[in-house]
Image: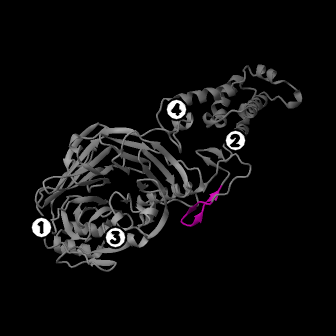
Amino acid sequence: MESRPVDMTRSCPSPASSGPETIAEDSTRGPPITINELVQLSHIGIPNDQVTWNRVTMTSDKWIAVRHDNRTDLSARRAVVTVLSPIEGTISYAGSTSADSVLMNPSQALIALKAGLRFEVFNLDSKELVNKVKFHDVVVHWTWLSTDVIAMVTDTAVYHWNINIRKTENEKDLQQLLDIVKEESEKKGLELNRKKTEVMVVSRKQELPIINIYIKGTRLKQKDQFKYLGSLISSDGRNNSEVASRIAQAKTNFQKMKTVLTNKNISIQTRRRALECYIEPILMYGCEAWTISKQTQRKLEATEMWFLRRMLRISWTAKKTNDTVLEEAHTTRLLISKIRKRQATFFGHVMRREKLVNLVTTGMLEGKRSNLPPQQVFVRHHRLAFTEIVSYKADPTLNWLALTGLTPEDNRISGVTQLYNKDEELTQCINAHACCFSTYHFPGNPWPSTVFCVGSREVQDHGKVHVIELGPYKTGNYALRNSYDHLHFLDDLERYDFPISVEISVDYGLLFVVTKYGYLYICDMETAMCLCCTRVAVDVTFAAVLNTNTQGLLAITRGGQVITVDIKKDGFISYLREQVRTAYRANKFEKVICQ
């Protein structure tokens, strides 16, 4: 790609300082966007002097967590945690704490607390402790890396703590998990069938608990048993119903083949082979997962004798013992030994594989309260030795990792990012102030790619934005791309501005770069071309995330404002055609909106 500097001097309007909403849509100055104030933190009791990047955290657009002091009176001051929903503008939780730092899970109602070397994770709905650990070293930066993993950065290394929270043990957890499945499915164009979705409680209680699980307001039907891959799964956790069902099906099919299996003109050896070929597979289907109790064993042995007696046409009135029947059939009891052999064979396959069925069979699950300590992932690069760690990001597979640190240097702020590949155990340092990962499907490629996007500030007023397609190369795709474009920074009153956040709108194919002093650069994901720049906040901006509802941005300013920045779709199309003069990009954006 041929990159060129983009002059942003005329396209950087300042937002209005008053009013909850500002619209920047003058085509001669900047792109048509809307800026709305969602929450003012001071209005909910959070002093402005405590609105700082280490006290106010926003891991996603679902929650903002604030650790602050509740009173100005030093004698009665105590630490308080306030969790609020920025979209709804409501407080989800408020309570005192002894923690020095708090983080909300990006997708679930789980709060992580840090107090010195102690880390605890609580479920806000059930008020239960999910997991805890006492670490061995001072943590200088920590964050939720995914729904399950908390990352901890020390002065020398990076650690991952897997807390295993997908296990559901109550109604709220199950509803929450189902909501996540529903949301993620809808993002891929899939929809859960409410009529075919049912719930079941596995319990030893005689009276099963009644639970209420909903999909789009419709309560799901609760069952005491259901069929899965042809096998009956019961609410009591036993396989009595499944064994009874298998016996009934086997006897029904025996009756259908009665003319062959009971024909005395055919030798008993041949008929037994037919029984083993056509009837026993029906009886033993799924037997690898059975628990053979004494009662179950008696039923299966009785079924085996039922087959032999009818094959030999021995009536119950003949009063012949089972041993006599076995002798006449020239065989012994084989059914239970066959089941045991199949179970042993299956168990051998399970033990040789490192998959979920292995964990379920052996019971070696960490479960809800894992005792596994955080695991070291990689060692920090020496270029990050004297930096303040401000960000740690990962791709969806947790294979590509990026650690970012900032440091003052010659009247400017220098940024260094350590990129690490977990599979290859390779590391590389680049000059970058902010970065992010995503999975993106470039036009013309049959397969989606992992992309690494970087925003940096160089000497004087120049910076760069990079869109880097990471390996390994996928057959059929174009060559891995590394696109970039220049950014022009506008420092006010000799203040040094630099990127503090990079976010990707996969739906729109846009890349957002947010700077410390409230400037927003909107770039094209395919070419990294900077399409426009505008100022969205007057105060210092220290946090920004993607607004998944609008594909815009949520940002927090030093003045306590929580704002949403959204693109006016129709106006943005006109802006691309008339000001940026990229008809291709405008047509593509219009196509996205129509979809």
Tag 4 residue = 350
- The answer to which image quadrant residue 312 occupies is top right
- Asked if residue 517 lies left or right of residue 549, the reply is left
For label 1, the SS is: loop
Could you tell which of marks 1 and 2 lies nearer the N-terminus? 1
Labels 4, 2: front one: 4
Q: Can residue 524 be seen at all in this image of the molecule?
A: yes
**Which dot, 2 or 3, sits closer to the camera?**
3
Query: Hey, what amino acid is under mark 1?
Result: Asp
Circle 2: element type = helix
Work out whether mark 4 precedes mark 2 in sequence or the reverse, and give the earlier one: 2
Q: Which of 72 and 343 is in front in this view?
A: 72
Question: Which label lies toward us, 1 or 2?
Answer: 1
Q: What stretch is highlighted in magenta?
A: 212-222
* Residue kind at label 4, given as amino acid type: Val
Position of residue 145 relative to residue 66, above or below, is above
Q: Mark 2 points at which residue?
A: 249
Sequence-wise, the earlier of marks 3 and 4 is 4
- Marks 2 and 3 sit apart, C-alpha to C-alpha, by 64 Å
Dot 3 or dot 1, earlier in sequence: 1
Asked if the magenta segment contains residue 213, the reply would be yes
